Image (spheres, grey):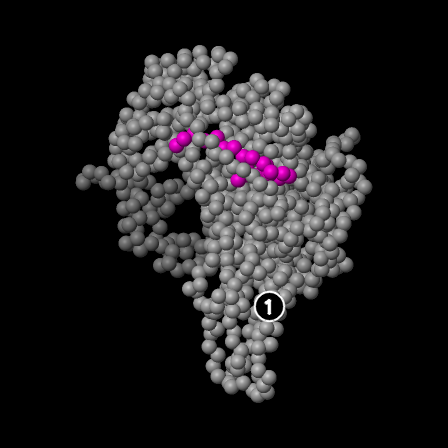
Amino acid sequence: MDSDGWDGDIADEDLISALTQPSQKQTDTAPGISISGHASSFVTAPRTASSSPAKSTELHNGIPPSLGRAHRDQSRVEHLDGLPADAFDSSPVQQRVSPIQRSNSSQAFRQTTLWGHALDHDEPSQQPQTQSRRMYRADMPPEAPTHHKLNQDALKTWVYPTNLGPVRDYQFSIVKNGLFNNTLVALPTGLGKTFIAATVMLNFFRWTKDAKIIFVAPTKPLASQQVEACLNVAGIPRSQATLLTGEISPSLREGEWEKKRLFFMTPQTLQNDLSKGYADPKSIVLLVIDEAHRATGDYAYVKVVEFIRRFNPSFRVLALTATPGSTVEGVQAVIDSLGISDIEIRTEESIDIRQYVHAREVTPIILQPSDEMLRVQELFSKALRPLCNKLAQVNKWLARDPMTLTVMGLREAQKQWALGAGSRANQATKGMIMAVFAILQSLAHAIKLLNYHGIVPFYNKMVDFRSEVEGQGSKGSKNKRQLVEDENFQEMMLVIDKWRRLDNFVGHPKLSYLCENLLNHFMDAGQGSSTRAIVFSEYRDSAEEIVQTLNKHKPMITASIFVGQADSKRSEGMKQKQQIETIEKFRAGQFNVLVATSIGEEGLDIGQVDLIICYDASASPIRMLQRMGRTGRKRAGNITLLLMEGREDEQYRKAKDNYEKMQRFICEGTRFNFRNDLSSRILPRNAKPEVDKRMVVIPIENTQDTSLPEPRKKAGVRKKATQKKFHMPDGVVTGFMTASEFGRAGTATARSKSKGPEEVDILAEIPLLDVVLLDHRQTDELNHTYRNLPSHRTCREHITGPDLGAQSKAQARLGPVVKLKHGAHTKRCVKLFKKLAKAQSPLERHLRPYDDTERLLYRQIPLPGFAEDS
């Protein structure tokens, strides 16, 4: 059963099971028919709704898929030929059907895995069929219609461009699946992930009328590479495409979102435009994510998908990568972050891509430290010994060999000590240990530079360290001053400075082998050859030294550096425009060696690169495979790994084994939970597009202008960006809403300033005196708490009560305040005093404070003495 959008809503296996297994009585096979051999050797693996197996292209029981139907038909004819003449003359005897047993015939086919290993035949041949994982089932509630405007005529077909030559089966299969599922495409580099993305983008461009299609890549150079593929292969009009980055002003980006439909951009720019309201998340129908293995944690890919999904459940995700992840948890994080419902994975050993994979020979070179390196290591170890001895009580391993210190090892030792003995240590000991850990962690990076990159990068790091300590003077760390003033440290710096002044000095054996290998490569290629080489180094200081060393061999070797945008202490970074220019010059042959840091590991498509040299090894299989993928795209390539004996060699082997293990896990697909609930079909269920394989006509505007479709500022008044827009999901009630309106249909009432209650002069009923006045117990408690002060036994002090009539004029107005405002009760009291003052004239107030009735009631109240006096 195919799990794509073109089949019916009921699984084929379900229909066959319903027809062949009646509810009351079951029929047995006809007499004389033996089910064995070919028929019984096919085993159906269960499919679950929670986990979707990754697509694989292995031979099913040794039979190619294209020949499977013909082989089964021939097998059935052979069985029918062997039946007796009266096989169908009478009804078969009804009896209980027993499970079909596996045939042990030597003619049965053997079922193997993608790597050629035989399956375990101890498993039962008949496994219970679980619920199909297909998303569009008849027994499931139908999806809500998409809010995008669809082109009904275009929905009848989906276009597969044949501009690049013959159809590749794996590309066709991946495109077909990616149109109807949120798909993670994991293909080795150079096998056409960009073409797959362009084809999917073309069909969503045809199917929708005004929906937005977005391609995001980590850097502008990567996004720029995709523009040519989508415009010159898929044939999407250039007038509908734009390239947006952070360098484009917000006003221009806002205008592009109003006019264009196809966007190439970085995820940070997209996240900013969504949050500012320039881009409407409900208008997005397709999001293509390049280098999707980055979609973990708080990376912009994750934030963008979360933001869009809050407003728009009807959009497709197509994720592209060569290395999904280095761990099961990492791959699952990508699946959850992007809402992936299916994985299309191919390895270099997959059957359907073998003919398209160019050979890549990987050669690890194990090197030994030079005499100069051993001399520097010896002096630096002696200088670090006093600091390491202070940590002997924490971890004996730390005091053995200072040259084996690593940042991760020191952090782990510090964490264990802090949770153990450090929690019981006094503050002086704890402060001293923590200070030593901090110093050694800052120096561990320098040790790594010395061991794996060279003496010169190490020396530059130590110069910065010494300058920092000397700049702080006596106010700085005592331990750092002791290290800088150590005689071994000073001797080391003098020796390295003397070596650096020599013309033929080489700071690391990797540099010697690198120059020799590149010289041999270009000499073998011959003069005028278009061959190129890329050297990868993890750190910029090391890359700069490599460029300086290689350029000594001009004109045979001409090298240029390729780094990120951040500035370092000794050099400036490369802006995105400079990065694109460097790549174009490298393609054009202005220099033949590109020395790149991690910025060049992903996505660079340069077909003439025949040699990759990894100056250092990475324990991450993602980075290792990304580096290797820069060659072998158009023709066979060579990869040379320069490794130091010991830890670096072990890291490479670990990365290689981890990569192979993860490829097996992903192909199995049983360890992952796929998000079918987040993958909507978008197209109506009655739409079943048929494939239309044809040459796509490229618009003239795409060929006339080959520059990047970046918006340019026009002359005239500069348009300012509008205020931030707030896009709301469908069905959201806006405006102020009272608590009583929650859960009710309709819109909320407009928020308006509420009016306070109108005051009415209504006399309250006179309460009973027993309710108003305090009894004796309450009076004693009041006096004890507020009036009587504890003093000598024979003497008791009392607090005089307030005289309410002492400041009558002041009580009738609000006094000035500084920081605190008058409260509501204070305002009410002042208002009351004003009314009392205006109730009677002053003379009448003294002669007759109240009328006779009120005076009688007043005299009946047993007021305290201070009230009687007033």
Question: Residue 785 or 697: which is nearer the viewer?
Answer: 697
Relative to residue 624, is residue 351 depicted above or below? Answer: below
Give the residue type that dot 1 points to: Arg
Residue topped by disc 1: 72
792 left or right of 605?
A: left
Residue 504 placement (x, y as % from top left) = 50, 14
Residue 465 placement (x, y as % from top left) = 42, 20
**Residue at 48 percent of width and 68 percent of height:** 105
Name the image quarter holding residue 530: top right
Q: Can residue 735 be seen in this snapshot?
A: no
Relative to residue 786, is residue 221 depicted above or below? Answer: above
**Residue at 60 percent of width and 25 percent of height:** 523
Asked which secondary structure carries label 1, the reply is helix
How many dots with numbers? 1
Question: Residue 690 or 760: which is nearer the viewer?
Answer: 690
Magenta-colored span: 625-646
Name the image quarter holding residue 303: top right
The N terminus: image quadrant? bottom right
Relative to residue 426, is residue 60 depicted above or below? Answer: below
782 left or right of 653?
A: left
Is 643 in the magenta? yes
**Residue at 51 percent of width and 13 percent of height:** 503
Residue 589 placement (x, y as % from top left) = 67, 27
